[in-house]
Amino acid sequence: FLYLLGQASVQALPDGTITVSALTDDAGNPLHWREIRPLHYQEVHGQTLLDFVADPHGRILYFATSENPASILQRMPARLSPSIFGPLLGITLVILLITLVIWFGGWRIRRHYGATLALSRAQRITRMLSGFGVVACVAVVLGWFLFVAVISANELLLVRGGLTPWMYLLYALGVLALCGVLAVLANAVAAWFAPRRGRWVRAGEIILSLAMIYLAWFIVTFGLVSFNVRF
């Protein structure tokens, strides 16, 4: 997850040069590279080389520089690109936050008028667990982004191991979030087959379930439950 957020992007410029977001000068400005032969570039006003390696079909596999040839940057699948998962994750979080606002608002209104939901004991339990699940999913995603923001401000906190307990806490929270996904799915099934449930309620449960399924994929794919503190 930490490495995926730091992915490098290659951009072609109108003057025929390219830039790589991860390759910058001492001032943080991107270096410019000019092609000297197919898939081989040289730093403008410099001697450093940048080489791209492609498969037999011409698809770029990875690239590296002559200054640090042991460190290669591999091409990531589109589904793992920030330009893809970023908007999807944003939409998912918006759905979850709207859901929490609606649930809280409904609870306040019912409390004000002394009303209760006509639910069975099993339905109340699944609804309550699904609420905890949504909160856990929002918390684990925001927690990891806050974690990244903290180490971006001071990398020594990560290197010295000061944030290791927080990593374990976030991993444990990720497990709770996955359990919450199952609770949301169970609640959606119960709501779908329950009598006197309107179409909008059922549609809302489906949308929430889809958002939670995507978030479960995100948590597993990006290793947010790996309990691995090595990097």
Image (cartoon, rainbow, N blue to C red):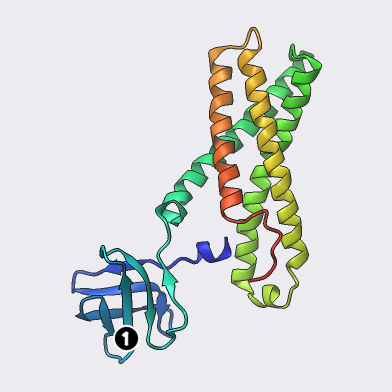
Left or right: residue 128 versus residue 44 is right
Q: Is residue 152 above or below residue 118?
A: below
| Residue that lies at the very extreme toward the front in this rendered image | 56
Q: Which of 181 and 86 is in front in this view?
A: 181
The image shows residue 182, relative to residue 141, as above or below, that is: above
Mark 1 surroundings within 10 Å by alpha-carbon count, few (fewer than 14), some (14 through 19), many (20 or more): many
Left or right of 218, for residue 160: right
Seen as rendered, the residue at the extreme bottom is 47
Q: In which quarter of the image is the C terminus?
A: bottom right
x 57%, y 31%: residue? 208
**Left or right, 216 with reference to 114:** left
Where is residue 132? Give x, y as percent.
Answer: 73, 36
Which of the 4 image quarters holds residue 67?
bottom left
Q: Is residue 142 left or right of residue 14?
A: right
Q: Which residue is drawn at 65% across and 43% down?
A: 137
In percent of the image, x 29 and y 79: which residue is there? 32
Nearer to me, 215 or 223: 223
Quadrant location of the N terminus in the rendered image: bottom right
Tag 1 residue: 49
Residue type highlighted by circle 1: Leu
Q: Where is residue 74 drawn, in percent x and y?
A: 42, 68
Against 48, residue 124 (above or below) is above
Location of residue 187 by image quarter: top right
Residue 193 in percent (x, y) is at 63, 13
